[in-house]
Amino acid sequence: MSKAEIANLKHQSGFNCAQSVLSVFAEDFGLPLELAMKLASSFGGGMKMAATCGALTGALMALGLACGYFEADDEDQKAASDEMTMELLRRWQKEIGPTDCKTILGYDVSDPAQRELAIQAGALDHHCPKCIGKGAEILADLLAKLN
């Protein structure tokens, strides 16, 4: 089973989009599953305000684990991290288009009435699995190129 499929299964079991994507990569980079789930818990629903998609933020967090920097003066690693980040974002925009939940879903899920309308219209069931799958797929592809 691919990481994209596993991420979607996690989402179906009740985790948010960011948790679903980050969790399938976290342990590969030494981040325990429980910490990954806690870290990403505030990023679902576009950071709870229909902003940047949780699947995208989860992928970016995992990418940081893979190629991020931790020394302020490590210009080479900063440049490498920025390059991979921009590649992930370019691919996301090519595959998905918008980066924010409100535009992707067509509803402002931070508003309870709009969220209910999105659920009734099936917007979450249609768009979220696609974003989670694509986020995990793009990330897996980028990580394979690092090795």
Image (cartoon, rainbow, N blue to C red):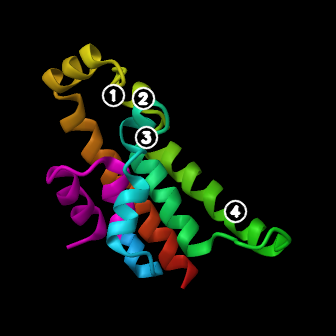
CA distance for labels 3 and 2: 7 Å
Residue 4 inside the magenta-drawn segment: yes
Q: Which residue is mark 4?
A: 83
Helix, strand or loop at label 1? It is helix
Q: Whole-percent x and y of residue 34?
A: 32, 68
Looking at the image, residue 14 sits to the left or right of residue 48; the answer is left
Mark 1 or mark 3, which is nearer to you? Answer: 3
CA distance for labels 4 and 3: 20 Å
Q: Residue furthest bottom?
A: 147
Q: Which residue is mark 3?
A: 53
Q: Which residue is mark 2?
A: 50
Residue 87 inside the magenta-drawn segment: no
CA distance for labels 4 and 2: 26 Å
Looking at the image, residue 97 sits to the left or right of residue 113; the answer is right
Residue ID at (49%, 48%): 92
Q: Residue furthest top?
A: 113
Q: Which residue is mark 1?
A: 105
Q: Whole-percent x and y of residue 45?
A: 36, 36
Q: Whole-percent x and y of residue 88?
A: 55, 57
How crowded pointer 2 is (Cα within 10 Å; few <14, some 14-19, many 20+) is rated as: many
Helix, strand or loop at label 3? It is loop
Q: Which residues are magenta?
A: 1-24
CA distance for labels 2 and 1: 9 Å
